[in-house]
Amino acid sequence: MAIYEDLYSEPTPVQHQHITGGRLKQIHTQKGAAPMAVPLAKKQKIDPNTSWSFFHPGRVDARFAPDDFRKRVKALDDKLEVAWHPVHERWCVWVKNPHVTHWMCPGWQLLFPVKHSDGTYCPLDERVLAEIINRSPRKHGHKIRVRSLVLVSGGTTNVTFQSGAGGTALTGAIPLVANTGFSSGIDDEGHFETASATLLNVNVSGAGVSVFGWLTYYEVPASA
């Protein structure tokens, strides 16, 4: 039995997304005053071990769930796996995804860490199995939730993101001229999302105008 189809989103661990802005070289406190230097902040180093995506099932030191529970998970879908995160001390549910090529968890996509809503430890029981089924795209259909995007236009146009071709507008019309663009920044909750089982459409006005860029997204259950 297989309840998880191939997932095409490649999530990048949140802890390793760095947002950088422009440099503030100097400011003036008042008219005629000397400029005041503002030192640039140093980028904080982050330990990859703290990322939920670091201890994936493909590691040689991976610790798997007890055999009886693991068999019940595999009965739902053989691509599923449950592995222990030794830093957070929580179980994590994973699914094989060959489209994930990030160095931290190549070939594996994290579905969710097993924990209560307040973050406390949750044992492996029927609640975990129910959550696996509840998150299955095959059971509910899925929505595309956009986490970040960058877009550059090759000409004068208005760009609108839609749920479905010619469907519901997810954004207002974004006016762009040639060789200009924008970056949305990162929103872990998602900037916008499509309806269930609906493609994400980028509507571009003007004949012959091309746009370029990229986006990151998650596939989430229709009930999410």
Image (tube, rainbow, N blue to C red):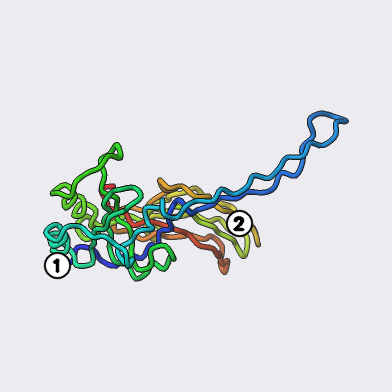
Give coordinates of residue 197: x percent, y percent.
29, 58
Q: Position of residue 78 (x, y in %)?
A: 19, 67
Q: Which mark is residue 181?
A: 2
Amino acid type of the residue that numbered disc 2 sits on in the rendered structure: Gly
**Residue under the image location 25 percent in, 42 percent down:** 121
Number of numbered callouts drawn:
2
Image quadrant where one finds the N terminus: bottom left
Label 2 Cα neighbours within 10 Å, binned few <14 / some 14-19 / many ≥20: some
Query: Which circle's residue, 2 or 1, is located before the other in the chain?
Result: 1
Please name whichever residue, 214 or 118, is drawn nearer the observer in this view of the structure. Answer: 118
Q: Circle 1: is it few (<14), some (14-19), or many (20+) Cα within 10 Å?
A: few
Vertical relation: 35 (above or below) 224: above
Residue 142 horizontal side relative to residue 14, left or right: left
Task: Give the secondary structure at mark 1.
Answer: loop
Taking the image as drawn, is residue 24 in sight?
A: yes
Q: Which residue is mark 1?
A: 1
Task: Specify the label residue 20 is tagged with.
Answer: none
Q: Say which amino acid is labelled 1.
A: Met
